[in-house]
């Protein structure tokens, strides 16, 4: 199969690329930074420079592709949803121009709301647009990435995490490597179903209080968590340099899924993946602290 992978150096993409190589596939890696692909990976892949928000580049880069793993790049302007819209237009145009048969889309828990979940609304727009395309589509509705904790290493070192979510509210947490495994199977599948939603909920639902407790045990140092107001969180984003619209969109990814939200797909053998948070902390986080 001719399979293309976007964001091949991302948290999911780097695992997915290696899984496909081990399966005997020479994936086409689509990236804005081809020089960043490790030499040992490049040897077994085709690397193509591409901007996911440029329809002409995406169309050219996916010529002859049978299946593509599509990730909307993170918003990087003062109009986050417009950034997502440009990426959506790119993949849909490529699907139709190149008759791409299968798209596996990295979406998120919360996209089923369609509106009111900040940047996740951009993923929802991509889902809707792909559903209208001629491709067979699998939407991976992923839980909260373990790797988001890598952005909080200074807070972990200081022993204090902050969130706008209730500390006792459970939500799905998932290892990026597990998402890659589900993605690899979906990409290589010969299933003819036109549209499939596959939630990826991780090994177990966890509250922020439980996460802090696991960090404390695994790191051998106390890590606490406190709930802060929406306004304080927004102010923090602004101090970090986010434009106001982006700060609002990032904040709403939490607040939009906070009160009474239930994922469309419940936890089951279909949606549960194996890697526990403890294992990920030992392998990925602890070596960085």
Image (cartoon, rainbow, N blue to C red):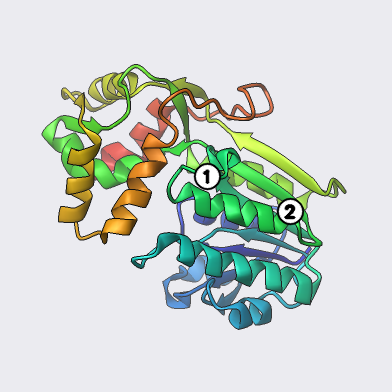
Q: Position of residue 246 (x, y in %)?
A: 33, 57
For numbered disc 2, what is the local secondary structure? helix
Percent of width and height locating residue 138: 71, 48
The answer to whether residue 275 of the structure is visible from this angle is yes
Tell me what residue is drawn at x 56 percent, y 39 percent: 113
**Which residue in the protein does label 2 denote?**
131
- Work out which quarter of the rendered image holds the N terminus and state it: bottom right
Task: Kindly report the distance in space between the C-alpha atoms of the residues bearing marks 2 and 1.
Answer: 17 Å
Quadrant in the picture for the C terminus: top left
Secondary structure found at label 1: loop
Towards the viewer: 276 or 25: 276
Residue at the image position 28 percent from the left and 47 percent from the top: 151
In the image: residue 226, left or right of residue 93: left
What is the number of callouts on the image?
2
Could you say where residue 235 lies in the image, as x and y percent from the top left?
17, 47
In the picture as drawn, the residue positioned furthest to the front comes out as 115
Left or right position of 236 against 80: left
> Is there any visible trace of residue 19 in the rendered image?
no
Q: Which mark is residue 14?
A: none
Q: Name the N-terminal-most of marks 2 and 1.
A: 1
Q: Which residue is mark 1?
A: 115
């Amino acid at each position: 199969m001719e399979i293309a992978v976007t964001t091949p150096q991302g948290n999911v993409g780097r695992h997915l690329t290696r899984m496909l190589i081990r399966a005997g596939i020479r994936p086409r890696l689509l990236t804005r930074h081809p020089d960043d692909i490790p030499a040992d990976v490049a040897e077994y892949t085709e690397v193509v420079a591409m901007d996911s928000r440029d329809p002409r580049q995406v169309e050219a880069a996916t010529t002859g592709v049978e299946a593509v793993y599509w990730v909307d790049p993170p918003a990087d302007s003062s109009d986050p949803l417009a950034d997502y819209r440009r990426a959506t237009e790119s993949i849909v145009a490529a699907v139709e121009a190149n008759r791409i048969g299968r798209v596996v889309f990295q979406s998120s828990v919360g996209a089923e709301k369609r509106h009111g979940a900040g940047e996740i609304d951009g993923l929802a727009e991509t889902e809707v647009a792909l559903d209208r395309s001629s491709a067979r589509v699998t939407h991976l509705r992923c839980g909260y990435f373990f790797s988001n904790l890598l952005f909080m290493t200074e807070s972990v070192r200081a022993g204090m995490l902050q969130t706008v979510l209730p500390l006792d509210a459970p939500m799905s947490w998932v290892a990026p490597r597990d998402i890659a495994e589900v993605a690899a199977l979906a990409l290589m599948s010969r299933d003819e179903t036109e549209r499939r939603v596959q939630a990826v909920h991780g090994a177990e639902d966890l509250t922020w209080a439980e996460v802090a407790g696991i960090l404390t045990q695994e790191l051998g140092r106390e890590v606490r968590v406190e709930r802060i107001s929406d306004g304080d969180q927004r102010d923090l984003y602004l101090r970090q340099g986010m434009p106001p619209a982006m700060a609002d969109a990032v904040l709403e990814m939490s607040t939009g899924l906070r009160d009474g939200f239930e994922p469309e797909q419940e936890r089951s053998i279909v949606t549960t993946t194996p890697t526990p948070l403890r294992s990920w902390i030992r392998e990925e986080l602890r070596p960085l602290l």
